[in-house]
Image: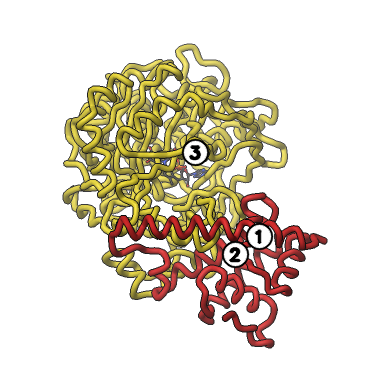
Amino acid sequence: MLKQADPTSGERAFEAQSVYWALFRGDAPFILIQRYEQAARQLDGAANPGDISAIHQLLAQRADLEAAELAGRLTGRLPLLTRKFSAMTYLAETLPDHQRFYINRRSSLAGGVMMLTWAGMLTAVKLARGLWLLRSVRRG
Amino acid sequence: MAKFIVVGSGAAGVAAALELVRRGVRPLLLDVGYTNHADLPRVHGNLYDYRRGHDSFDLHIGPDLGGLASALANEPGVAKLNAPNMAFVTRDADRLAPLEQTHFQAVQSFAAGGLGNAWGAGLYRWTENDLDNFPIALSALQPYFDVLTREVGISGQDDDLSRFFGDPAGLLPPLTLSYNARLAHDAYLKKRDALQRAGVYLGFPRVAALSRPHNGRPACDYNNLEFWQAQPYIYTPVVTLQEMISRDQIDYRPGMLVHSWQENDNAVTVQATDIHNQAPLQFTGSTLLLAAGAINTARIALQSRNDFSTRLPLLENPILQIPLILPRSIGRRLDTHAFGLVQLNLVWQSAGHGTLLQGSLIELTAPMRSEFFGRFPLSARGNLAAMRTLLPAMMMMQLYYPGSAQPPAELSLSPNGRLRIVAPPHNLDRGALAPLLAALRSLGLWTHPALIQQPPTGHAIHYAGTLPMNDDPAAYQCDPTGRLHGTRRVFVADSAGFPTLPAKNMSFGMMANAMRIAATAAGS
Ligand SMILES: Cc1cc2nc3c(=O)[nH]c(=O)nc-3n(C[C@H](O)[C@H](O)[C@H](O)COP(=O)(O)OP(=O)(O)OC[C@H]3O[C@@H](n4cnc5c(N)ncnc54)[C@H](O)[C@@H]3O)c2cc1C
């Protein structure tokens, strides 16, 4: 389960943990949290305050960020969250022990088809939940 | 006094200088000339082996997060230019040559070797068809194509594309195809007659990446590092530049930002600034060859006349990016030993467009997988799954349209020193692509029209036509020898002089033309 981050490490570390959890279902390595914080600072600096506030609410509610990100991306409503997911995806890809999330090293057509079917079903569930979640956040 | 002054060390400037050197002249080459100072360890061996054993943050992203630039800005960027080792290619461009752009995204380089440091290295000879509206014949370029083919080392093969890519003489054997490219190529060979009846031709690219050692440089090692660090098997203009410097054949002066020229009866004087101490400097010569890239060559021409009212045309190839899926490869292991740039080319004689269109089929093994996050209409973990299982089954086709497929942009100089570039908003007609998409399907390459993207104008990075050649030139045009109207000693050696832009990577044509112009200037 997602753990509340060390209270001294601040809001962005908690955000980093939450985004990481939504993508990889685990605890984010410390180096990744640090790098993510740097990227998130840049993103927040240029973002619209409504989007920042919407993300704060989602984090405070311990909402399903994967669902919110998907609904935001497909409806064009929360680009900041997608950028944060994207930044985390890039940063994690540079870590040796994360290669298995990105690189397929064994060939299996059946495995591939099953994986894509799972991805489609997961997406349907997350989209329904995400659309509902986005209705509940206030942007201001 | 120098006899010849060349401005710029990109593909055009280096080719012009090479021709002068061949004629026994030692030109003065003025350049801003940034080089790569990123203090990064060089990766040896395979990209994916390296990533398994090392934190690749410095290689891919860098402490300033430059590698995340497009992701953080949420703007389509050119992934290769964001790599920490490529940052020098576009360094300081906004400061040295500020632009104000509408519906255009130009990429400018002030590096030694220019944009060629990051290029895809597709170097295609031109044919008569490509010279449509040029006031010169192909025979004027042929000898220079031959010289350059030997100098550069170009891989390829005499195949169905030779009729579009010119004489295959001197080509090195083609590079080994990736697994997916091989599937598509095999399918083409089986269905070739039907495809050709539909106007579709497929074959090997002409690429400046060595399939065997050449001129002291090694052959491609298929390690997927093309996006991340300079590769000795890929030719860039720096190869020739360094050779000419080490043999003392040119007087190379980096650190010089050229502003303008003034001409009198006997000489031309170039005004420049030393970028390190801002000191103004002058250089005098008998002939000036401008090769600062089509945009900056135009800037220098406008600055030389303090002209804030003229609007010059700016040509660019519109492009479409077409993601292609090979269903047979779904779930396959990633081809970690592939050449990470263009694998195959396709030429489409499109009846609907009334012209040739050129496609480059690119392997997706070199960029980071994360480049594709969010491109699949799936949840975040669904995207990760697709990156793992679908990307090894995908290629990207970059489809080039001729410059005439959309109205030219306009370029003018503002009194505040900015260049204004205004392009009309323009959408290519994707409906007309149906026959091409059907042909691709028959090759086992599937896509959906909704997945096709048109990047902003400027993303082909083929800028041209700002000072076009004309038999009867007017102001801001050149005569067929490249001499700028109203001058006696100023020649335009880069693609600024192109009156039109074919649907083809333009650099090889530009290099041959730069040599032709240098030869004429040296003879006159
Ligand atoms: C990612 C990428 C992929 C590409 N792939 C291909 C491909 O496969 N095939 C292809 O044909 N083309 C490709 N291109 C395009 C190709 O790189 C350019 O068209 C070509 O390099 C342009 O060369 P140039 O000499 O005209 O200008 P540039 O490369 O822009 O060089 C300009 C030179 O002039 C100097 N300069 C500029 N202004 C001044 C000034 N005021 N004072 C002093 N010096 C100045 C700069 O320092 C630089 O040395 C690609 C480009 C990129 C970025």
According to the rendering, which colour does chain A have? red
Between disc 1 and disc 3, the foreground one is 1
Q: Nearer the viewer, residue B190 or A33?
A: B190
Q: Position of residue B455 (x, y in %)?
A: 54, 40
- Pointer 3 chain: B
**Residue at 27 percent of width and 37 percent of height:** B206
Residue B95 shows in this picture: no
Residue B280 shows in this picture: yes
Secondary structure category for the residue under label 3:
loop
Residues tagged 1 and 2 counted as in contact (Cβ below 8 A): yes
Checking the image for residue B475, the label placed there is none
Q: CA distance from mark 1 to mark 2?
A: 8 Å
Circle 3 crowding by C-alpha within 10 Å: few under 14, some 14–19, many from 20: some
Q: CA distance from mark 1 to mark 3?
A: 26 Å
**Residue at 34 percent of width and 48 percent of height:** B363
The residue singled out by tag 3 in the image is B452
Circle 1 crowding by C-alpha within 10 Å: few under 14, some 14–19, many from 20: many
Q: Nearer the viewer, residue B342 or B251?
A: B342
Q: Position of residue A130 (x, y in %)?
A: 66, 60
Q: Quadrant of the C terminus of chain B?
A: top left
The residue singled out by tag 2 in the image is A66
Q: Which amino acid type corresponds to the residue marked 1 in the rendered image? A: Gly
In the current view of this chain or complex, which residue is farthest to the right? A140
Q: On the rendering, which quadrant does ligand 1 occupy?
A: top left
The residue singled out by tag 1 in the image is A130
Tell me if the residue at label 3 has its CB under 8 Å from ligand 1.
no
Q: Position of residue B464 (x, y in %)?
A: 49, 30
Asked if both marks, 1 and 3, belong to the same chain, the answer given is no
Q: Earlier in the sequence, mark 1 or mark 2?
A: 2
User: Residue B260: which quarter of the image?
Assistant: top right
